[in-house]
Image (cartoon, grey):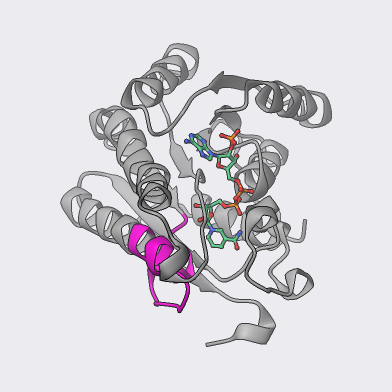
Amino acid sequence: MGIELDMAGKVVMVVGATSGIGRASAEMFAEAGADLVLAARNGGGLSELSFELERRHQATVVAQAADATRAGDMSRVVETAVLRFGHVDTLLYAAGAGALKPFAETSAEEFERLLAVNVAGAFNACKAVLPVMERRRRGHVIALPGILGRAPMAQAAAYCASKFALTGLLKSLALEHKRAGVRFTLLHFGGVNTPFWDSIKMRVQRERMLPVEAAARAVLFAAAQEGEAVLNEIVMQPESHQL
Ligand SMILES: NC(=O)c1ccc[n+]([C@@H]2O[C@H](COP(=O)([O-])OP(=O)(O)OC[C@H]3O[C@@H](n4cnc5c(N)ncnc54)[C@H](OP(=O)(O)O)[C@@H]3O)[C@@H](O)[C@H]2O)c1
């Protein structure tokens, strides 16, 4: 994997663990020795991933099917984590939905879905996990606003709106929690070659995107910072799209 980071004894909760960046990160966290709490809607996918991580990395994994847009589901995942491990060190909010298309073709329902998964889901996950972190005065929230949570793009109005909202949520929470022991990292990745793009019609060159392993390495690197250090924001672009 290129870098050796030790996450032994750390409890990492991944929401959106069944695919793409969340899944690749869960694999690297397991390899680095972390205990894992995995959540996504697809229970079968979660069971298959848990089995893999236990078999390949002897990881301790609890998995729970959950929809991030439901506040109760996020609370139950955090309750399960606390029952099993006593606390949560790191939340990776990797659930997300995409729609990149002309504004005229974007329906109100699609916009609502983007806001629900990309923003309200992150709100629900933070609402559930932050009290646990605040009590311990220790914790770390990592999320993926992406480059479109920082810069606008044509044919991405609804998606950018949801991702800028996520950026606003996280940056405000970071200010509210400084000196409370809870750290926040916003990862602004350009295109990452994941199943996210399977349903997107916009013409893109997937082979020139960031490999998912590069994204997961950045997640792990952010999570493994020690002491006072916080990687608040990381911008990572494919070589062909440098800023
Ligand atoms: N790929 C990129 O180019 C890129 C670049 C920058 C940022 N990002 C962001 O990174 C995040 C992950 O993207 P990805 O590329 O890894 O996408 P992906 O491969 O489509 O994976 C999305 C994950 O989110 C889960 N999910 C979706 N809706 C959910 C819900 N309501 N509740 C719980 N889990 C839910 C999915 O699992 P289930 O279907 O099992 O629920 C899946 O595990 C997204 O927020 C995306 O916007 C992606």
Where in the figure is residue 51, as x and y percent of width and height?
Answer: 76, 22
Q: Is residue 217 above or below residue 56?
A: below
Image quarter where the N terminus lies is bottom right
The part of the image, by quadrant, that contains residue 90 is top left
Q: Residue at x 51, y 49 (%)?
A: 97
| Closer to the camera in the image, 200 or 231 | 200
Q: Residue at x 47, y 64 (%)?
A: 105
Would you say 131 lies left or right of 187 here? left
Would you say 166 lies left or right of 222 here? left
Where in the figure is residue 107, as x and y percent of width and height?
Answer: 41, 55
Q: Is residue 216 above or below residue 126?
A: below
Q: Residue 147: within the magenta? A: yes
Q: Residue at x 39, y 52 (%)?
A: 227
Q: Residue 120: within the magenta? A: no
Q: Residue at x 24, y 28 (%)?
A: 135
Residue 41 seen by the camera: yes
Would you say 8 lies left or right of 49 here? left
Q: Residue furthest front?
A: 104
Count of marks, rendered view: 0
Where in the figure is residue 174, as x and y percent of width and height?
Answer: 25, 54
| Closer to the camera in the image, 41 or 53 | 41
| Span colored in magenta | 144-162
Where in the figure is residue 111, as x and y percent of width and height?
Answer: 38, 53
Residue 139 seen by the camera: no
Q: Residue furthest right?
A: 56
The part of the image, by quadrant, that contains residue 165 is bottom left
Q: Residue furthest left?
A: 176
